[in-house]
Image: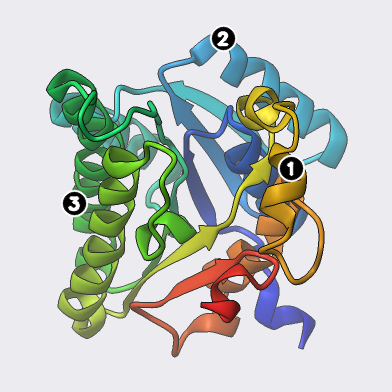
Amino acid sequence: MKKRFDLSGKVAVVIGGAGGIGGAIATGFVEHGARLVMASRNIENLKLRAAAIGRETGGEATAMGVDITDEEDVIRLVGEIVARYGTVDILVNAHGANKKAKGLDLSMEDWQLLHNVNSMGTMISCKQFGRIMTKRRSGKVINLSSVRGIRANAGGNSAYCSTKGAVDMITRCLAAEWAPFNVNVNAIGPALIATKLTEKQMKEPGRTEKYLRNIPLGRLGKAEDMVGAAIFLASAASDFVTGQIIYVDGGLTAIG
């Protein structure tokens, strides 16, 4: 059973690895034996995080820069990784952006920014890393979605929610296209996760209490809560799982 979740020797790429969720998943991969590449535009923070993961785990973690919205830059990144490691076995698209605004106030510049990063960036990454995986007829792709891909709210999230709905359909469509090549494409859909990015909004009076009324497990999610699902989707344990969005949400989507 243990070997089903073993990632020893696998080359794992986490885009957005400097973030809370991406960093937690990256650490979990190294703990399970993967050779890790973390990539984002925030290269200095990324180098610090990669070094910390290496110290904590005794494993291998490398930082590389990339602009996920620039396809030529992603092509460059893929080339550098393949030149160094020979292939890519696992891809996690954990990058993301959000700007809240009511529908009547939302600027199209912000709308486009979110779609560039969240949906187009995911498609570019899947496309270019998918070339390697489909050619070698093996690979695992994990996209970071959200409960907001299927659940609306009145909090000014029309742009963000629409990007995550797009990520869900990218995931399902590529899963269907790449199944003949033995490439699994799935997504993780978290509820609100307590990270530095969400700390400010959750300090608003009554905000956390109101939110938790819709979480059957009665607490906020942590970045570490995403790791188990990611290990499962990256490992041989999920070889017959593709096109799925796994909601790690404390039961939020179970109650409608």
Front one among 9 and 196: 196
Return the mark for residue 208.
Answer: 1
Q: CA distance from mark 3 to mark 1?
A: 38 Å
| Label located before the other in sequence (3 or 1) | 3
Residue 26, given in percent of the width and then of the height, sits at: 63, 44
Type of colouring: rainbow
Does residue 189 sit above or below 100 in this rendering? below
- Tags 3 and 1 in contact by the CB under 8 Å rule? no
Is 76 placed left or right of 145 in the picture?
Answer: left
Check disc 2 and give the amino acid type. Glu
Return the mark for residue 189.
Answer: none
Quadrant into which the N terminus falls: bottom right
Is 192 placed left or right of 210 in the picture?
Answer: left
Residue at 16% over, 28% down: 112
In this rendering, does residue 145 appear at all?
no
**SS of the residue under disc 1:** helix
Front one among 161 and 82: 161
- Tags 2 and 1 in contact by the CB under 8 Å rule? no
Residue 180, given in percent of the width and then of the height, sits at: 20, 84
Check disc 3 and give the amino acid type. Lys
Check disc 1 and give the amino acid type. Thr
**Mark 3 lies on residue:** 127
Residue 29, given in percent of the width and then of the height, sits at: 66, 53
Of tags 3 and 1, which is closer to the observer? 1
Would you call the spot at circle 1 few (<14 residues within 10 Å), some (14-19), or many (20 or more)? Answer: some
**SS of the residue under disc 2:** helix
Labels in figure, total: 3
Return the mark for residue 44.
Answer: 2
In this rendering, does residue 241 appear at all?
yes
| Label located before the other in sequence (2 or 1) | 2
Residue 227, given in percent of the width and then of the height, sits at: 68, 58
